[in-house]
């Protein structure tokens, strides 16, 4: 891995970004330090977007872009970005300590191909141009198990149509969950989208390129099955 010069001038979008003041969650000194140092150039506050989001401007150059929705502690994002330096990784998360942890990993491993957005992923996706994404990763999204809360799920028909519209033709939507009922609902929802092709014709074998995430580790410890679904935009 090459090291990255974090003292370089922040990209143009940084002017729109306010200084980050984490209000909740416990963070180590290393995480807090990385957040303070990297946020101005590597972070995007979604609520501050006042128009379309140009993903290339976030990175200062063009490359195929992977969006990870709900990156949690960011360990999977960092591992995938390190193994895949020719693509850009944009992680979206609402949880401040998770963002700080990812930025600490970015700093420690010199990952110049990662950026982090804070806020609601769907607001960010709506602000992105159609066809701008090479891949979308939704790894272990909140399952919202109660029926009256299903409307809060990320994977539901209208959101899938939105995500698909931002994928380039041939781009992939990769979802994983340990919640069997949500897995089945995801499978049906994704299969019903006319603009997507199911790469494996149902649940996919666990792809080696997907690192074990924090929530996956918990699920495996508890003995739960993991379900992967990989679709391609037509
Ligand atoms: C169950 S955790 C999984 C985290 C990580 N992907 C993993 O596998 O360890 C779901 C994550 O999604 C985040 N999240 C939920 N809704 C979100 C949204 N609308 N936009 C961005 N992040 C969201 C939560 O804060 C949480 O960190």
Image (spheres, rainbow, N blue to C red):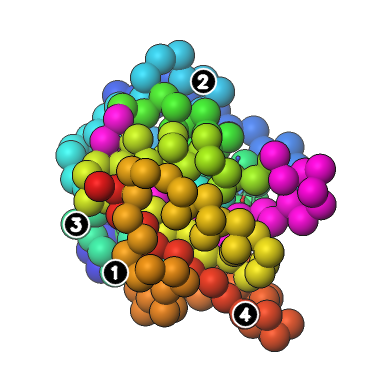
Q: State left or right for residue 24 relative to residue 41.
A: right
Disc 1 + disc 4, Cβ < 8 Å: no
Please give the residue where the numbered disc 1 appears in the rendered image.
Answer: 83
Q: Is residue 113 above or below residue 159?
A: below
The residue range painted magenta reads: 130-151
Q: CA distance from mark 1 to mark 2?
A: 31 Å
- Where is residue 72? Give x, y as percent: 59, 56
Q: Quadrant of residue 133?
A: top left
Q: Tell me the crowding category of disc 4: few under 14, some 14 to 19, or many 20 or more residues within 10 angstroms, Cα based.
A: few
Please give the residue where the numbered disc 4 appears in the rendered image.
Answer: 225
Of discs 2 and 4, which sits in the foreground?
A: 4
Residue at (73, 37) in percent of width and height: 23
Q: Which mark is residue 86?
A: 3
Q: Is residue 49 above or below residue 25?
A: above
Q: CA distance from mark 2 to mark 3?
A: 28 Å
Please give the residue where the numbered disc 2 appears in the rendered image.
Answer: 48
Q: Tell me the crowding category of disc 2: few under 14, some 14 to 19, or many 20 or more residues within 10 angstroms, Cα based.
A: few
* Residue 119 visible, this orientation: yes
């Amino acid at each position: 891995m090459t090291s990255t010069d974090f003292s370089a001038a922040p990209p143009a979008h940084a002017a729109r970004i306010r200084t980050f003041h984490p209000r909740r969650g416990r963070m180590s000194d290393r995480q807090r330090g990385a957040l303070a140092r990297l946020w101005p150039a590597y972070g995007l506050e979604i609520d501050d977007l006042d128009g379309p989001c140009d993903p290339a401007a976030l990175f200062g150059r063009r490359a195929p872009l992977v969006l990870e929705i709900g990156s949690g502690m960011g360990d999977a994002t960092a591992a995938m970005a390190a193994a895949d330096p020719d693509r850009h990784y944009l992680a979206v998360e609402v949880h401040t300590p998770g963002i700080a942890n990812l930025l600490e990993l970015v700093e420690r491993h010199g990952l110049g191909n990662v950026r982090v957005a804070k806020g609601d992923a769907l607001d960010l996706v709506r602000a992105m141009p159609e066809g701008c994404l090479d891949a979308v990763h939704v790894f272990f999204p909140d399952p919202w198990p109660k029926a009256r809360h299903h409307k809060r799920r990320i994977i539901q028909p209208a959101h899938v149509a939105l995500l698909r519209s931002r994928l380039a033709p041939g781009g992939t939507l990769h979802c994983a969950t340990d919640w069997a009922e949500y897995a089945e609902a995801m499978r049906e929802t994704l299969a019903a989208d006319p603009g997507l092709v199911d790469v494996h014709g149902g649940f996919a074998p666990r792809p080696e390129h997907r690192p074990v995430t924090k929530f996956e580790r918990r699920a495996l410890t508890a003995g739960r099955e993991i379900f992967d679904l990989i679709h391609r935009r037509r």
